[in-house]
Image: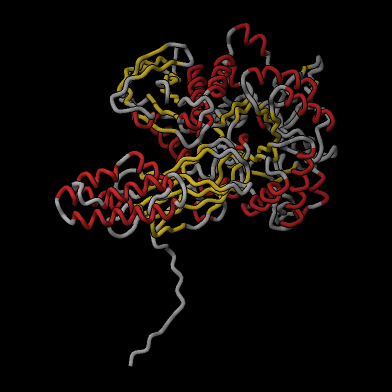
């Protein structure tokens, strides 16, 4: 006699399989992220055996407990991929899942239409349809829809009518409306539940401007020494930064600077008596990361600067640089927080071939808990002083599990804090920093300059990694002056700014970009006379008078961003084609249902990425991606020049890098779109 052995078994799939949910982080270790106002594309693969027709719904629970259901639509035929887009307006942790079901009515209607037309199983199909309506009537109860459903059921049972007339009842508009709320469904299956963390809008949307406060108002004395700029003199620059449309002002480290191994001009090892040193060499006898450099003012002066910035519509971001000068107080108080070499000396920082003798990196492995808690204390201190944004210097040189710990501790107390990772490093680390909680990241954008490079990278940022990595497309930094900028002149500066400002919700410039400061130190990608090592006061008024600034161009870009919500989205970028290897084309579209005005907002960017030439070509647009019907023609307006054109799917363009290197075209959609 055979014996049946029963073993424990847990299904990993539901009655109707629901797989490959999106957005989700790889491995689903941490929540995927979005921001307030973002239109999030949700998707899942839904299928089942046989030929029955399916349906799917997205079920979203907001942080306040409100639950919404959103119908999902099937995508490309044969992919079994279902989609829904939802704009999220409430910060906090949302939970969501997908529910799939067999659409018994749609399955029956499809089969009945085919069979009755062929004279196959006619009466059987009509009886089955009436039975489905019985289920709908029961579900409708005493609602007005019940009468419509009952009338349709009786008509379908009336044998004095022809089969085609009885079937026609099934497609009546009134019945369709009644079935929208009381549709016969079966085998409803729920996916696993996921978390989507929605953060404040500034976590993903902003125009950043970087300046050194010590340079703003700095004056050289007759004896060769300098009078440093202060928070008070730097505050005089705030209205001009705001007038250009920037809304975040980033300050390099504002702490005391070490004197031991201080660097001189252009990173030399022989500083002069008046060289101020690099702000990233933090700490001296005057204090460490908790202190303000006395040349800049006091903590009270800093807080007044933060207030003045807010009055100009600017948020202040400060640098969180976890490293120390040799004379930082931590070196004597906590030598275990550093790496000691066999000769007893402390290891200084290196990024071959660069050497930073004025900086000691921290070592978290000797006292992880002690050092971590000290950093948390510092972050909370600066939050108390009014800071809500931290640009983190070289986070990839610290353990990932430290950042996971720190960012979660800060988030629990201050969920509005934004951390930007300055991580020019390998993809695995860069992406993982975003995964564990960094709200933004620097990217490889500065080194992606050709059409093909930009097409691939912008697609990656907007679609492949957008569930956890938000790009901040800085066009330059004190450390980065690419060959493209060194040799491309004004056209290169305009091209890079236009792409950065339109391709990502967040972009940034380092002060001096508008003056086309493009002379590099020999054999490097750094500005000569680098501001990291010296004061660099700039005569903004003289540049404006002489017309040697592109500040008006940057202002125009930020104005366009402020007026077009499509540009303040991350995941809506579509690359289009052109016949020229230097003409980059992409669009960003936001459907009218997500725009306060109710009108669809669409922007097409056409950029000549060769700063040395004029190019003529044809661009080919995917009209469906623009929300337009095949064969449509439509009006566009160039938001840089004001010129108007009539466009369609294929369009001639001519872009002279020296005259107009970039079109930023607003699509004038027909009313009702």
Residue projecting furthest to the top: 545
- On the question of residue 61 being in view, the answer is yes
Q: Residue at x 24, y 50 (%)?
A: 158
- Residue 573 at x, y percent in the picture: 44, 33
Depth check: give the residue in front, 390 or 609: 390
User: Taking 495 as reference, is 356 left or right?
Assistant: right
Residue 379 falls in which quadrant of the image? top right
- On the question of residue 433 being in view, the answer is no
User: Taking 470 as reference, is 364 left or right?
Assistant: right
- Residue 86 at x, y percent in the picture: 50, 40
Q: Residue at x 35, y 31 (%)?
A: 624
Depth check: give the residue in front, 27 or 195: 195
In the rendered image, the quadrant that contains the N terminus is bottom left
- Residue 294 at x, y percent in the picture: 84, 30
Q: How is the image coloured?
A: secondary structure
- Residue 177 at x, y percent in the picture: 39, 41
Q: Residue at x 36, y 18 (%)?
A: 615
User: Taking 293 as reference, is 120 left or right?
Assistant: left
Q: Residue at x 24, y 46 (%)?
A: 167
Depth check: give the residue in front, 7 or 137: 137
């Amino acid at each position: 006699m055979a014996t049946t052995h029963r073993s424990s078994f847990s299904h990993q799939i539901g009655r109707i399989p629901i797989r490959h949910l999106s957005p989700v982080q790889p491995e689903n270790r941490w929540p995927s992220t979005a921001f307030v106002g973002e239109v999030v594309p949700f998707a899942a693969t839904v299928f089942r055996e046989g030929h029955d027709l399916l349906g799917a719904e997205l079920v979203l629970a907001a942080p306040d407990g409100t639950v919404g259901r959103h119908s999902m639509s099937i995508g490309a035929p044969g992919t079994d991929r279902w989609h829904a887009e939802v704009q999220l307006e409430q910060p906090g942790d949302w939970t969501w899942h997908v529910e799939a079901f067999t659409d018994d009515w749609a399955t029956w209607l499809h089969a009945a239409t085919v069979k009755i037309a062929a004279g196959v199983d006619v009466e059987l199909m009509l009886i089955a349809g009436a039975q489905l309506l019985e289920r709908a009537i029961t579900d409708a109860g005493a609602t007005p829809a019940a009468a419509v459903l009952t009338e349709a059921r009786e008509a379908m049972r009336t044998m004095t009518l022809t089969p085609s007339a009885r079937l026609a009842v099934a497609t009546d508009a009134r019945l369709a409306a009644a079935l929208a709320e009381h549709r016969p469904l079966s085998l409803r299956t729920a996916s696993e539940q996921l978390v989507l963390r929605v953060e404040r809008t500034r976590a993903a949307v902003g125009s950043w401007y970087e300046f050194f406060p010590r340079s703003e108002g700095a004056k050289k004395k007759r004896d060769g020494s300098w009078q440093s700029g202060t928070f008070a003199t730097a505050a005089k620059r705030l209205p001009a930064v705001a007038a250009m449309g920037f809304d975040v002002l980033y300050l390099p480290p504002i702490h005391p600077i070490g004197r031991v191994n201080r660097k001189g001009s252009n990173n030399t090892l022989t500083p002069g008596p008046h060289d101020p040193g690099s702000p990233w060499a933090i700490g001296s006898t005057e204090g460490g990361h908790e202190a303000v450099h006395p040349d800049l003012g006091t903590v009270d002066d800093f807080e007044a600067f933060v207030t003045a910035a807010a009055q100009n519509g600017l948020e202040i971001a400060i640098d969180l640089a976890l490293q120390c000068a040799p004379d930082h107080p931590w070196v004597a108080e906590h030598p275990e927080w550093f790496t000691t070499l066999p000769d007893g000396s402390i290891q200084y920082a290196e990024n071959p071939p660069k050497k930073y003798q004025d900086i000691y990196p921290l070592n978290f492995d000797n006292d992880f808990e002690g050092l971590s808690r000290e950093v948390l204390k510092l972050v909370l201190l600066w939050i108390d002083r009014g800071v809500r944004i931290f640009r983190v210097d070289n986070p990839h040189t610290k353990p990932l599990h430290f950042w996971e710990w720190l960012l979660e501790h800060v988030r629990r107390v201050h969920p509005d804090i934004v951390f930007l990772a300055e991580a020019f490093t390998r993809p695995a680390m860069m992406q993982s920093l975003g995964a564990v909680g960094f709200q933004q990241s620097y990217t490889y954008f500065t080194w992606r300059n050709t059409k093909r490079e930009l097409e691939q990278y912008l697609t990656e940022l907007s679609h492949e990694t957008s569930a956890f990595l938000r790009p901040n497309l800085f066009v330059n930094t004190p450390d980065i002056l690419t060959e493209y900028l060194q040799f491309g002149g004004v056209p290169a500066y305009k091209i890079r700014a236009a792409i950065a400002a339109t391709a990502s919700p967040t972009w940034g410039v380092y002060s001096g970009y508008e003056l086309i400061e493009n002379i590099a130190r020999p054999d490097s990608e750094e500005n000569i006379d680098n501001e990291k090592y010296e004061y660099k006061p700039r005569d903004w008024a003289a540049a404006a008078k002489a017309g040697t600034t592109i500040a008006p161009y940057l202002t125009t870009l930020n104005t366009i961003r402020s007026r077009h919500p499509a540009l303040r989205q991350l995941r809506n970028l579509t690359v289009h084609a052109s016949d020229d290897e230097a003409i980059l084309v992409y669009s960003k579209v936001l459907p009218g249902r997500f725009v306060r005005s109710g009108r669809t907002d669409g922007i097409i960017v056409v950029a000549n990425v060769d700063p040395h030439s004029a190019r003529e070509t044809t661009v080919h647009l995917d009209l469906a991606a623009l929300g337009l019907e095949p064969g449509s023609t439509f009006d566009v307006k160039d938001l840089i020049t004001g010129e108007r054109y009539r466009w369609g799917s294929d369009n001639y363009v001519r872009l002279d890098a020296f005259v107009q290197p970039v079109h930023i075209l607003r699509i004038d959609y027909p009313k009702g779109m």
